Image: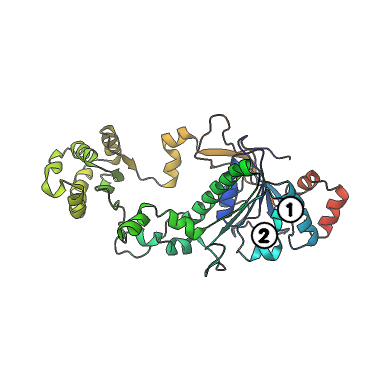
Amino acid sequence: MPHKPASQALSRFTVLDLTRVRAGPTAVRQLADWGANVIKIEQPTTDSKGQLGGPRDGADFQNLHRNKRSLTLNLKAKDGLEIFRKLVAQADVVVENYRPDVKHRLGVDYDTLKAVNPRLVYASISGFGQDGPYAKRPGFDQIAQGMGGLMSITGLPGQGPVRVGIPIADLTAGLMAAQGILVALLERDVSGEGQWLSTSLLEAQIFMLDFQAARWLMDATVPPQAGNNHPTSIPTGVFETADGHVNIACSGEEIWRRLCSALGAPELAERPEYESSASRLENRDRLNAEIDAITRTKPADHWIEALNAAGVPCGAINTVDKVFDDPQVRHLGIARDMTGCERGDVKVVGQPVRLSRTPSEIAAPTPRAGEHTDEILREIGYAEADISRLRADHVI
């Protein structure tokens, strides 16, 4: 089928997707979900597995590659490289996440493709950057979480390093790359020229340290593991209830006093050991135990309603199934229908941003490998006889 844009917002742009695994596909999914004509370029293969090592019809792969078209193409073949360069001549964006030396070996690096299309925006995602002592190392999310400091501040005090339960370095690198692409496209409207942008899992992970990084860079404070406690806003953390647990977030003196009143213990706010943020930090364990003694007397739903009514942030701690059963989540509609995929009609996670005139939709399911090869080649001028020859020669 011809390109069916998921939104009109980016429908004028064509993106060539050379990415694999997760960070790169995440970046490209952002563009596809906002309507870009994404052509996912894959190696010709009879292997039914997806690029993450699991089945192509697995939930992960299907959620990651919707709204794209698939072209199988052997870039190591002369004819395959010629096809790719014809696509580049008409494209706006190329996204790749090879190790830095690989793209030069294949002849798909920025300098080579810039000669074909000076308006090209070329995005590279790597584990550690395009140069430097670690440039040729293979990148992996958990490695970046460790090297980027996240695992040292995640988990209970004294527990030892703990990874975050999602591939946050991969996802953040992908989102940053997508943002960089959009910035470069906006700049191209002024200069008329494309450019090369790059990011890495390590840089993205360090960026996500945010205030924890600032504590070191400005105050020379090495943040420790704080478990479920917020490092600086006290009391903020997980508290036990009669039937489970809740999160309570208390920042500032006004909310602290509201919390004490809503707990039925206004006297806590008058105690000298809790009278300031600094003293509450110093006596955090004791304070948390006193709050726990109160919250354990009633169920979670009681505290969620009572504290929010008092202007104190409080929320459930949901398992993933309960996340999607939450009335606010159902109202937001972030679980989106995807019809016609290899598994039939399913749901995937939609975009968390809403545009009033050009919303994002799930316009097309994740494609089968090479599903759109013939139509894409026809779009750039190949005849049926040419396509048959290329297939016989294993170029496509």
Residue found 46% across the figure and 32% down from its top: 331
**Percent x, y of residue 76:** 74, 63
Residue flagged by tag 1: what amino acid is it?
Answer: Val
Q: Which mark is residue 109?
A: 2
Q: Is residue 370 visible?
A: no
167 relative position to 359: left or right: left
Between 375 and 216, the one lying in front of the other is 216
Q: Residue furthest right?
A: 385
Q: Which image quadrant for residue 363?
A: top right
Between 156 and 121, the one lying in front of the other is 121
Q: Which image quadrant for residue 68?
A: top right
Secondary structure state at the residue bearing disc 1? helix
Residue corresponding to mark 1: 116
**Percent x, y of residue 365:** 64, 43
8 relative position to 260: left or right: right
Between 182 and 111, the one lying in front of the other is 111
Residue found 21% across the figure and 52% down from its top: 281
Residue flagged by tag 2: what amino acid is it?
Answer: Asp
**Percent x, y of residue 306:** 26, 34
